[in-house]
Amino acid sequence: MHPVEVTFDALLLFSMVVLAWQGVHARNMFRAVVSFMMFGLLTAVAWVRLEAPDIALAEASLGAGLTGALLLATLGRLGPERRGPRRRRAMKLSMLPWLALGLVGTTVLLAVTLSLPAPGLGEAVLAAMPAAGVDSPVTAVLLNFRAWDTLLEIGVMLLAVIALWSLGQDVLASTSRLPAPALPALVRVLFPLFVLSTFYLLWRGGHGPGGAFPAGALLAAGLVLALLAGARVPERMRGAPLRWAVGGGLFAFLIVAVGGMWAAGAFFAYPPQHASILIAIVEIAAGLSIGVMLTALFLGGEPTEVRRGRT
Amino acid sequence: MIMMAGTVLIVLGLLFFLSGTVGLLRFPDVFTRLHALSKADTLALGLVCAGLALHADDGALQLKLLLIWLLVIVSGATCSSLIARAALAHGIRPWQR
């Protein structure tokens, strides 16, 4: 490797360790959240260095972007932080066992990593690519070979939304807004671009880095930005339409999976001649639904349904 | 020759990043820091993008670099305005000598 690359990687690793430390030991919650977001960004860069652009995209949009927005929104709702007496965190003797444990753990992890078979399952995936229906190996694994895992991931996300919504109602309506004319203007310019990029990523998932998760995160980022700028869920969208949008990804996924059982004889077995179109349907449905689900998490509760006939 | 020009632009951009960072560390309050960061970094990113565009031999890539710069200009300006307004709303008075 080129010395410049080695230096860059060393700096990257060092910054990540420092940010992780700051995230845990920050003076207040706000600093901790900002450290965490920067840690997410650098993790995305690390994935780029490991030549995994798909994970980098997902990490940058989900790990650094949306998780950060969720944490900051939570922080805003917690109210002012109570200041306890500052404890001195000196290196104490009691830390030694933990340090030793950490060292042993790292060594074991390293040994396990090195003992894994070197090429992993890459060869098997590449050998099966002609039957996958898409050109991108990552999408083939996510939506064809291991579609079951992806189905469960979307299911978990849906469960999170249901759990959050059952705790209460949309809290965004009660938060005060800053009089900032620049933000709504920015959102008006950028929102079409967010929608365009979402569909670009969905389309690109078929043959390169992209796909449902980064696309969904991007859509959610656009929607969250619109919410921050003062947009609210339209009244005719509340209730059933919104619930269908939230559950639609999982629903489409399940229909395709069960359809495979009927048409090709096994759960999630795509008939090879229709694999491409089926994967595209699942990808678009899942991407849009992931976007709506992430936005629903940001809302913090189901938007109040306005009853007709009452003022 | 074009490659050389690209490299010169990138190095120039890095110098502006450096000056913006020095401003962030040295200036007394949030408003002056924003002033240093937003302007220096926007120009720096523009120079770096221009330099990279000269190195790239692909028109689509050059357009993407231009798009990145434009997006950062718009969002950077908005963010600076939002941070400054939030600081004012929290009762932080601009620094005076």
Image: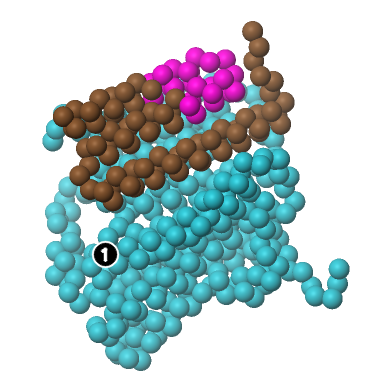
Chain colours: A cyan, B brown
Q: Nearer the viewer, residue A202 or A269?
A: A202
Label 1 SS: loop
Q: Is residue A77 magenta?
A: no
Q: At 68% from the left edge and 45% from the top edge, which residue is drawn?
A: A77
Q: Residue A87, located in which quarter of the rendered image? A: top right
The answer, for residue A287, to whether it is visible in the render is: yes
The spot of residue A2 in percent (x, y) is: 14, 32
Residue at image coords 44%, 31%? B42
Of B74 and A254, the residue lying toward us: B74
Q: Residue A222's x, y, as percent?
A: 53, 54
Instruction: Point out the image quarter for the N terminus of chain B.
Output: top left
Residue B35 is left or right of residue A304, and the answer is left
User: Callout 1, which amino acid?
Assistant: His
Q: Residue at x 24, y 31 (%)?
A: B6
Residue A78 visible in the displayed image: no
**Can you say whether A4 is above or below A184 in the image?**
above
Quarter of the image with the C terminus of chain B is: top right
Residue A203 x, y percent position in the rendering: 35, 66
| Residue with the most extreme front position | B1
Q: Is residue B33 magenta?
A: yes
Chain of residue at mark 1: A
- Boundaries of the magenta span: B17-39
Total numbered badges shown on the rendered structure: 1
| Residue A92 on image: x %, y % | 44, 22
Q: Which residue is mark 1?
A: A207
Please report the residue visible at 19 percent of the width from the left and 32 percent of the height from the top.
B2
Q: Is residue A226 above or below residue A134?
A: above
Residue, far top:
B97
Residue A111: image quadrant is top left
Q: Is residue B26 above or below residue A178?
A: above
Task: Assign the magenta stretch its main secondary structure.
Answer: helix
